[in-house]
Amino acid sequence: MTFQSIDTLRRIVPFQSSSIDRTLHIWESAVLLPLIEGAKGWEILFEVRSSALTWQPGDICFPGGHREDMDRSLSDTALRETSEELGIPQNEITLLGPLDYFYGVMGPLIYPYVGILPKDYPLTIEQDEVAALFTIPVETLLSLTPEKGKVAIGSKRLEGFPPELETKKMEDWVMQHTYDVYFYRYKERLIWGITARVLTQFLERLRKTR
């Protein structure tokens, strides 16, 4: 290997926005927390996932999904997914701004946004993904105290390690840290997981303004 000039090395690592190392199987997703003006104030719209889905059928979620090549930004992802799932043009959605993004335990980086849907707009759900819609008043959600559980996140060595690093505990899982999971109960509904985490962040910010 020949010695590389500093200018050549600079071209390898230029000062620009970095991207995710996708060999780690981490992907980017975006969701929209949709607000709708109700009779007595703001309400939050939730989706019930279709029972035909293989991943978390019947769970409650916000509109959202994986970033596609066509998306210029994560906010574009949130708007596109909301448009597809609710049958509403993107230009009818008022995007307010982002919440803090976070790492989901199953691999994705979640980028949540908050937006407003027009009042009384005739939504048409994408039935392959969405079984039903419902809303909960923001004031009601502010009055709820979520339950909290914990998930352990760990690692386990598989094949390919050098012999000198192999030990009798190669088959053991090593816990790295724990992850808080929130649960909101509203009537017969149970909101949990990523959706509850986004909701908690939004409600905490809202409480600070009061």
Image (cartoon, helix red, strand yellow):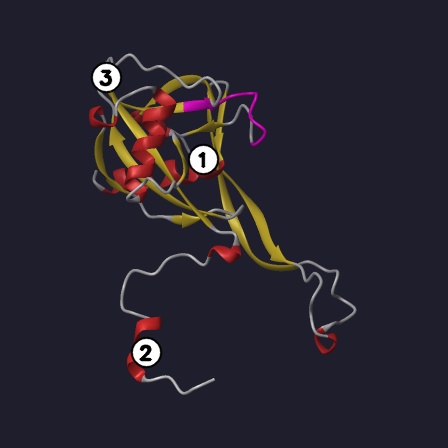
Q: CA distance from mark 2 to mark 1?
A: 54 Å
The residue to which callout 2 is attached is: 8
Whole-percent x and y of residue 39?
23, 14
Which residue corresponds to the image point at 28% horizontal and 40% vertical from the top-left? Answer: 75
Question: Going by the image, does 48 lie left or right of 198?
Answer: right
Question: Going by the image, does 80 lie left or right of 59?
Answer: left
Q: CA distance from mark 3 to mark 1?
A: 23 Å
The residue to which callout 1 is attached is: 146
Sequence order check, earlier mark of 3 and 1: 3
Which residue corresponds to the image point at 22% horizontal and 17% vertical from the top-left? Answer: 119
Whole-percent x and y of residue 72?
28, 44
Question: Going by the image, does 157 lie left or right of 96?
Answer: right
State the mark number for residue 13. Answer: none
Question: Going by the image, does 41 lie left or right of 143?
Answer: left
Magenta span covers which residues?
47-55
Which of the two marks, 2 or 1, is nearer to us in this view?
2
- What amino acid type should be assigned to the residue bearing mark 2? Thr
Nearer to us in this view, 192 or 129:
129
- Which secondary structure lies at badge 3? loop
Sequence order check, earlier mark of 3 and 2: 2
Whole-percent x and y of residue 194?
45, 39
80 vs 14: above or below: above
Whole-percent x and y of residue 3?
40, 87
- What amino acid type should be assigned to the residue bearing mark 1? Pro
Quarter of the image with the C terminus is top left
